[in-house]
Image (spheres, grey):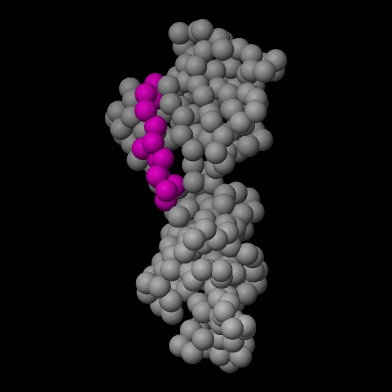
Amino acid sequence: MNTDLVAIGNWAVVNGAPCLDIARWDGAAWQALGTGLGSNVFSSGDRVTSVATLPNGDVLAAGDFDVAGGVPVHNVARWDGTAWHDFGSGTDDLVTSLVTTSSGAIALGGRFLTVDGQLSAFFARVEPACPGLAVRYGTSCFGAPDSLQIEDLAFVGGVMRSRVDGVAAGSLVLAVFGLTPAQVPLPSLLPQGTLGCVLLAMPDFVDLATTTGAAARAALAIPRVSALVGAVLYHQVLPVEPFAAGGFAVTGSNGQALVIGGLW
């Protein structure tokens, strides 16, 4: 849901469209999430108690309801931006609290005794089908040895975000993404390559990072394709530093190997 606000409560209409108990504010207007959650507004048996965002941007809602956008569910449902989905077999009773983690794990608390058919009274932690993971490799030849850090892990349907620090003023920063790692000295590729700097990711896709001061941020949208779950994405940034007297030099950060995660 990016930076949109998701609200829960008791209502039947959102911005003129039928939508029970949940809505999204996009910065300009309220938007419906399908037809919402539950089947009756103000019903004692239909209530939404908690909502959280999954690492890929999907919204997870929990409470005491048996339908989400016309789909039968059991107290927990997931919105993927287009439609509602069940969450396995859900819980057998009310969920009062819900928390998600950056790796995709979910913690639930409530009055339930089972979660997705498994005995787990009152509290449960549910792991994703494939957790997202980032492992640093190689060493940066500018700034700190681990100048490139991952801010948001890679999940299908989500956006991977990274940050690099120690960039020289005025630099153009290239974000490199590849499906295979590399170990190629930059001077062997470019005469402007800095001695001791290494290309660590094959450049299957290259984009410009957004630079602010000595920091730069990169982002890559991961398609919602199940075949990508478990694949490894290699990432590095290459700052192009201009010289006052003319010309430029290319340096390289450490690499990050990211396992593309899959949720439910």
Q: Is residue 255 above or below residue 98?
A: below
Q: Position of residue 212 (x, y in %)?
A: 52, 58
Q: Point out the image quarter for the N terminus.
A: top right
Name which quarter of the figure residue 171 lies in: bottom right
Q: Position of residue 41 (x, y in %)?
A: 55, 10
Q: Position of residue 137 (x, y in %)?
A: 42, 74
Q: Is residue 93 magenta?
A: yes
- Nearest the eye: 198 or 113: 198
Query: Which region of the structure is painted magenta?
Result: 92-107
Residue occupying image coordinates x 43% and y 26%: 50
| Residue at left offset 56%, top offset 69% | 170
Quarter of the view holding residue 172:
bottom right
Judge by depth and name the residue closer to the eye, 30 or 131. 30
Q: Is residue 99 magenta?
A: yes
Count of labels in the image: 0
Whether residue 237 is situated above or below residue 19 in the rendered picture: below
Q: Is residue 114 visible?
A: no
Query: Residue 98: x percent and y percent?
Result: 39, 32
Q: Quadrant of residue 149?
A: bottom left
Q: Can you name the residue that lies furthest to the front here? A: 245
- The answer to whether any part of residue 122 appears in the image is yes
Q: Residue furthest right?
A: 16
Instruction: Choose between 209 and 199: the one closer to the eye.
Output: 209
Q: Residue at x 44, y 65 (%)?
A: 165
Q: Is residue 146 above or below residue 200?
A: above
Classify residue 118 as left or right of residue 263: left
| Nearest the eye: 136 or 87 | 136
Instruction: Name the residue rendered at 49%, 71% in the picture.
Output: 168
Task: Indicate left or right for 16 with 174 as reference.
Answer: right
For residue 52, above or below residue 196: above
Horizontal arrangement in the rendering, residue 155 relative to residue 82 (left or right): left
